[in-house]
C-alpha cells in the first residue's frame, strides 16, 4: 500500500520533468555527464578536482571485474594493436599505438604478477542550475575542467531518466549508462584519487587556528618566514554577523598565550571584557578619563626609507621634529578638512615658534625630553591669541583668529579631554587596549583624528624593540580611511610595509573592502590589503563581493562560498595557499571572549 504522505514529503514541488538533454527537478535544472576518457597518468588525490567542481554533484560507482576475462580481453587488444602497428605510416598514430601496447603490458604485469585488482569505474557529474542559460555556462565550465585534466565528458542525451537514477542514492547503477561509461581501472588508481585524506595546514608549531572544511587541522605560526610568507600581517574582512570579532579574539588570545605583545584599537568596545579577564591594560581614550595622548608630543618614529640610517636622514633636515610635523599636518587635516594650504603654512610657523619656546629645535634629541616638557594644545591656543593681538597685517591676523577659533574645541572646549594634556598612557602590559567607544556620538572628524593620534602612538610602541613580537590590531579600520586626507592611508600603508623589520604584525579588520579602493587612495589602500600574508575573507555580498573577487582573483566557487555568508566559515589565504576553513573555537576561549561583538 502506497504511503502518500511520505511520497508527498519526498517528491519535489513542481515534480520531475525529463527533457532530451537535462532534467527539471522542482525549480532546478540538472544535466549529467559521464567521463569516457582518462589520462594515462594521474596524481594522488586526482578525484578532488572532479568531486569539488562548483554547482555540481559527483557520483562514483565501482563494480568488480572477472580477472580471467579481463586478462583475455587485454591480451586480445595487444595482439590487435601489434598487427595494426606494422601498417601505420603516420608517426603520431604509431607513437600512440605503441603507448597503448606498452600500457596494456604494464597492466598485465600489475594484475597478473603483482596481484593488483582491476575494477569497473563509472564517474558521473550532474551540473545544477536555475535556468537554461546558467546551465549552459556551468556545463561549459565542467567540460573545460575535464579537458584541462585530459579527460573527456559525454552528455547522456535522451537518457535523462537513466541519468537521474544513476545520480540517486535510492537506485542501482543503470545498465545502459554502465555500458557507456564503465572503464577498467586499477583499484590503487581510484583509491589514490579519493579526496578523503585532508592534511589541513601545518606549520609544525605555534597553535591550532581552525579546521579546513574536510576536517583537517590548521596549525598556524604567523611569524614564520619563507617563500611567499614575507610578513605577519592579517586582513580580516566580512559583513556584520559572520564572526569577524570571534576570529579576531581567537587570534589575539592565541598570540597572547604565545608571549606576543598585543595592542588593540577598539572603537566598538568589543575587547574590554576579554582584556580585563586576562588582567591586562584597558584604556578609555574616547573620553580622556583613561589617559591622554598628547598630539604635540614629538614621537620617536622610525624612518620611512628602509635603507637610510638616522644620521644620514638628519643631515637632510629630517630630524624627529620635522618628521612629527608631517604627522601633525595629517592630524589637523583630519580635524579641520576646511583648512587650505595657507592656513596650514601659518599653523606650522606658529608650531615651530611654540616648540622653540620649549627649547625644542629641528635637531633636538627628543628622547631625553620628559612628557611634561612638551607643549600642549592650550599652549598653542594661547600663542595663536598672542600672534593675533600683535599682528599688524590684517590678512595674517584673520588667519590667526580663524586657527584659534578652530582650535578652541580641542584646547579649552568640548574635546579638551581628548587632546589637551600631557601624555599619560601606561602601556607596560602584554595587552594594551585603546578603547574609543565613547566617541560613538562624536563628529566623524574627531573620531578619525583620535584614531590617527592613537595609531601614531601605537607605531611608536611597536618600533621601540626589534626583538619583541608586537601585534597591532586595528578594528573598524575604515574609520581611518578618508579619501579627502590620503596621508592617513599612506601612514597605514607604511606601517604595514615596515612593521616586519620590528618583529611587528598589523591586523586590519573591516566590513567593507570598498572603503580601501576609492580612486584617490586606491594605490595605498590596495597595497595594505595585498601586502598582508594572511587574509581571512568571510561572508559578504554586493559591491564588496565584486571588489573582493576582483582584487584577490577569486574563482567562481570561492566567490559563491563567500556569498552564502555562513557564520564561522572563511576563505583563508596564506601566501599563495587558499583554504576553506571553519573556526571551531574551544569552549574555554569563549569564557574569555565576553559578549562584545554580539552572538
Image (cartoon, grey):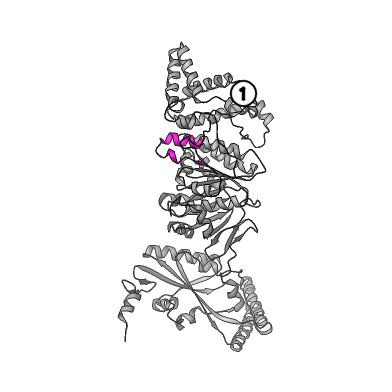
Residue 428 forms part of the magenta stretch: yes
Residue 386 forms part of the magenta stretch: no
Q: How many marks?
A: 1
Q: Which residues are magenta?
A: 423-452
Tell me the SS state at disc 1: loop
Q: Quadrant of the N terminus?
A: bottom left
Q: Position of residue 28 (x, y in %)?
A: 37, 68
Between 380 and 548, the one nearer to me in the picture: 380
Q: Which residue is located at x 61 percent, y 89 percent?
A: 68
Q: Quadrant of the C terminus?
A: bottom left
Q: Which residue is located at x 66 percent, y 83 percent?
A: 115
Between 567 and 113, the one nearer to me in the picture: 567
Label 1 sits on residue? 362
- Judge whether 383 appears above or below 307 on screen: above
Location of residue 462 by image quarter: top right
Res 119 visible: yes
Q: Position of residue 292 (x, y in %)?
A: 52, 33
Amino acid at each position: 500500500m502506497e504511503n502518500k504522505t511520505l511520497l508527498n514529503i519526498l517528491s519535489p514541488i513542481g515534480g520531475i520533468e525529463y527533457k532530451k538533454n537535462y532534467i527539471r527537478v522542482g525549480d532546478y535544472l540538472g544535466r549529467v555527464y559521464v567521463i569516457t576518457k582518462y589520462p594515462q597518468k594521474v596524481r594522488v588525490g586526482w578525484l578532488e578536482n572532479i568531486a569539488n567542481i562548483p554547482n555540481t554533484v559527483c557520483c562514483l560507482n565501482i563494480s568488480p571485474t572477472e580477472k580471467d576475462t579481463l586478462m583475455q580481453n587485454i591480451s586480445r587488444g595487444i595482439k590487435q594493436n601489434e598487427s595494426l602497428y606494422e601498417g601505420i605510416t603516420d608517426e603520431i598514430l604509431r607513437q600512440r599505438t605503441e603507448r597503448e601496447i606498452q600500457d596494456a603490458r604494464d597492466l598485465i604485469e600489475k594484475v597478473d604478477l603483482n596481484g593488483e585488482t582491476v575494477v569497473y569505474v563509472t564517474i558521473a557529474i550532474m551540473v545544477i542550475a536555475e535556468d537554461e542559460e546558467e546551465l549552459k555556462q556551468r556545463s561549459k565550465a565542467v567540460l573545460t575542467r575535464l579537458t584541462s585534466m585530459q579527460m573527456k565528458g559525454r552528455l547522456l542525451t535522451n537518457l535523462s531518466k537513466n541519468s537521474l537514477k544513476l545520480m540517486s542514492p535510492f537506485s542501482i547503477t543503470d545498465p545502459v549508462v554502465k555500458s557507456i561509461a564503465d572503464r577498467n581501472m586499477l583499484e590503487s588508481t581510484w583509491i589514490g584519487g579519493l579526496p578523503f585524506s585532508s592534511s589541513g595546514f601545518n606549520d609544525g608549531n605555534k597553535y591550532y587556528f581552525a579546521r579546513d572544511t574536510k576536517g583537517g587541522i590548521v596549525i598556524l605560526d604567523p611569524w614564520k618566514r619563507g617563500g611567499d610568507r614575507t610578513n605577519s600581517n592579517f586582513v580580516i574582512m566580512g559583513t556584520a554577523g559572520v564572526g569577524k570579532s570571534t576570529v579576531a579574539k581567537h587570534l589575539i588570545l592565541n598570540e597572547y598565550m604565545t608571549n606576543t605583545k598585543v595592542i588593540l584599537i577598539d572603537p566598538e568596545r568589543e575587547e574590554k571584557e576579554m582584556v580585563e579577564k586576562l588582567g591586562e591594560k584597558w584604556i578609555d581614550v574616547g573620553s580622556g578619563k583613561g589617559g591622554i595622548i598628547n598630539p604635540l608630543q614629538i614621537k620617536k618614529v622610525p624612518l620611512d626609507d628602509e635603507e637610510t640610517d638616522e644620521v644620514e636622514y638628519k643631515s637632510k633636515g629630517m630630524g624627529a621634529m620635522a618628521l612629527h610635523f608631517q604627522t601633525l599636518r595629517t592630524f589637523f587635516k583630519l580635524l579641520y578638512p576646511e583648512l587650505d594650504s595657507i592656513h596650514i603654512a601659518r599653523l606650522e610657523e606658529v608650531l615651530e615658534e611654540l616648540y622653540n619656546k620649549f627649547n625644542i629645535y629641528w635637531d633636538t634629541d627628543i628622547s631625553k625630553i620628559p612628557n611634561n616638557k612638551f607643549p600642549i594644545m592650550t599652549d598653542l591656543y594661547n600663542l595663536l591669541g598672542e600672534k593675533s593681538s600683535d599682528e599688524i597685517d590684517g590678512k595674517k591676523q584673520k588667519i590667526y583668529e580663524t586657527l584659534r577659533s578652530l582650535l578652541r574645541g580641542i584646547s579649552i572646549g568640548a574635546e579638551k579631554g581628548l587632546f589637551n594634556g600631557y601624555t599619560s598612557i601606561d602601556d607596560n602590559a602584554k595587552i594594551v587596549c585603546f578603547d574609543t567607544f565613547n566617541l560613538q556620538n562624536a563628529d566623524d572628524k574627531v573620531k578619525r583624528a583620535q584614531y590617527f593620534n592613537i595609531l601614531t602612538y601605537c607605531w611608536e610602541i611597536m618600533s621601540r624593540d626589534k626583538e619583541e613580537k608586537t601585534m597591532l590590531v586595528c578594528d573598524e579600520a575604515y574609520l581611518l580611511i578618508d579619501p579627502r586626507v590620503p596621508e592617513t592611508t599612506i601612514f597605514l600603508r607604511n606601517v604595514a610595509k615596515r612593521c616586519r623589520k620590528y618583529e611587528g604584525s598589523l591586523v586590519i579588520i573591516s566590513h567593507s573592502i570598498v572603503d580601501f579602493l576609492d580612486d584617490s587612495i586606491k594605490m595605498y589602500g590596495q597595497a595594505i590589503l595585498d601586502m598582508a600574508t594572511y587574509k581571512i575573507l568571510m561572508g559578504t555580498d554586493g559591491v564588496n563581493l565584486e571588489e573582493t573577487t576582483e582584487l584577490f582573483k577569486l574563482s567562481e566557487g570561492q566567490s559563491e562560498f563567500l556569498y552564502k555568508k555562513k557564520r564561522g566559515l572563511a576563505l583563508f589565504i596564506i601566501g599563495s595557499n587558499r583554504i576553506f576553513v571553519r573556526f571551531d573555537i574551544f569552549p574555554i576561549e569563549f569564557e574569555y571572549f565576553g559578549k562584545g561583538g554580539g552572538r
